[in-house]
Image (cartoon, rainbow, N blue to C red):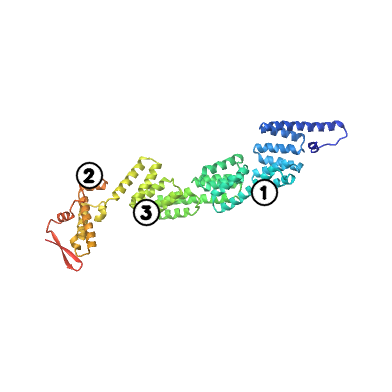
Amino acid sequence: MAAAAECDVVMAATGPELLDDEEAKREAESFKEQGNAYYAKKDYNEAYNYYTKAIDMCPKNASYYGNRAATLMMLGRFREALGDAQQSVRLDDSFVRGHLREGKCHLSLGNAMAACRSFQRALELDHKNAQAQQEFKNANAVIEYEKIAETDFEKRDFRKVVFCMDRALEFAPACHRFKILKAECLAMLGRYPEAQSVASDILRMDSTNADALYVRGLCLYYEDCIEKAVQFFVQALRMAPDHEKACIACRNAKALKAKKEDGNKAFKEGNYKLAYELYTEALGIDPNNIKTNAKLYCNRGTVNSKLRKLEDAIEDCTHAVKLDDTYIKAYLRRAQCYMDTEQYEEAVRDYEKVYQTEKTKEHKQLLKNAQLELKKSKRKDYYKILGVDKNASEDEIKKAYRKRALMHHPDRHSGASAEVQKEEEKKFKEVGEAFTILSDPKKKTRYDSGQDLDEEGMNMGDFDANNIFKAFFGGPGGFSFEASGPGNFFFQFG
């Protein structure tokens, strides 16, 4: 029997020793058969135990190692399985199944080149072996996915890398290297829970895996949990002092934390110029840290608003929400800047976004205020027409009316072109409207609160601006315009 030839045989002159050896072989075969029975029932732990007993009885039988390798593969213990598969082909280089199992273990662990060599050897022994042919194709596919992923990682096409690693992991489910690369790219894409899950699975099996510790830290770092991130980076560097990525990330995290804190301190002290410079420096540390950079942009936007650089503040807040479209604080800051620059439609849009996300009384009131200002902005701005502030006194309103009414009175422009006369007449009428509303406390209150003036029964199209003018200047004959030279006018009271 071929299997018997592979066992250690101690030659001795006495018959009983030979019988003992034969009995050991028979007992080993019995253990193997029991192992096969448990394997067929998918009770792989018991199968493993009986194959181990068979190996103990006859440690030079290649098939026993091959069977135990198959069992370990079913248990997902590929590194142990690889050892048994390699031992099986060391004992019998013509053992095709042994070479197949060795190749399969190499491939499962992500060593596709070694897998190819094993499958090639199996094909040399049996060139028609369909399993060897298919596995050889699978190994080459993994090699190709690795090459593509390496190129795409350099291009920062992280989605493509994740796709390639998912395909490779279908053939190499136990490869930590592929899993780590996938997790790192998931972190770069902002898919932190998925990345954390992959890294945690590896750490459960190997708590000292520096790559997995680095990825855990990277996720925390990108989620703006910088102190915790530093702890993981430090731990990774303890396990692997030369871990370049962990070293760079740790340095960036510490620098980012320090600059941000210094900027916050300067802001609280009212040193807005220094705060602006510190936040700007912090933004240059790591463009990949989206969440922290969103906060830095918002902080710098707040500084700009304090410096009354409102358009710059709006731009910073826009950068913040582009990086993190869930960042409520940035929307609120930008909305206030829009309000301050009378860009009410944009303010309403931002407050609507905020209120849809967080339906608080405060946010509802902010939205209502913005909607009211938007409504008011679509009417004529009587304050602008008179050229006065919204807090102008009664005397300031009268003085402004006197100046604007005289400036746009039709008689003053009687010698101008028909087009100019029409435009000045329109402005004269608007000045009269503005004075009529703003000089009446009740109407002014309604106008300021955004209420419709038509509810007062006043149709602004029916009144006569000349009557208002005459009433203001003391009635008919109160003054007249006379020419004092080409293009010059003065008014004369009667």
Judge the density around disc 2: few (<14), some (14-19), many (≥20) Cα neighbours within 10 Å. few
Instruction: Say which residue label 3 marks.
Output: 310
The reply to whether residue 234 is in sight is no
Instruction: Say which residue label 2 marks.
Output: 455
Q: Nearer the viewer, residue 101 or 273?
A: 101
Please indicate whether residue 198 sits to the left or right of residue 129 in the image.
left
Q: What amino acid is at disc 2? A: Glu
Residue 358's x, y, as percent? 40, 41
Q: What amino acid is at disc 1? A: Met
Q: Residue at x 20, y 63 (%)?
A: 413
SS for dot 2: helix
SS for dot 3: helix
The C terminus sits in image quarter? bottom left
Q: Residue at x 30, y 50 (%)?
A: 377
Q: Earlier in the sequence, mark 3 or mark 2?
A: 3
- Seen from this angle, which residue lies furthest right? 13
What distance separates the C-alpha of mark 3 from that of mark 1? 60 Å
Q: Nearer the viewer, residue 430 or 367?
A: 430
Q: Residue at x 38, y 50 (%)?
A: 334
233 relative to 71, above or below:
below
Please indicate whether residue 227 sits to the left or right of residue 485 in the image.
right
Instruction: Say which residue label 1 marks.
Output: 113
Q: What amino acid is at disc 3? A: Leu
- Seen from this angle, which residue lies furthest front? 128
Please indicate whether residue 225 sits to the left or right of residue 105 in the image.
left
Residue 115's x, y, as percent? 68, 46
The reply to whether residue 436 is in sight is yes
SS for dot 1: helix
Residue 172's x, y, as percent? 63, 43
Q: Residue at x 29, y 50 (%)?
A: 378
Q: Quadrant location of residue 481?
A: bottom left
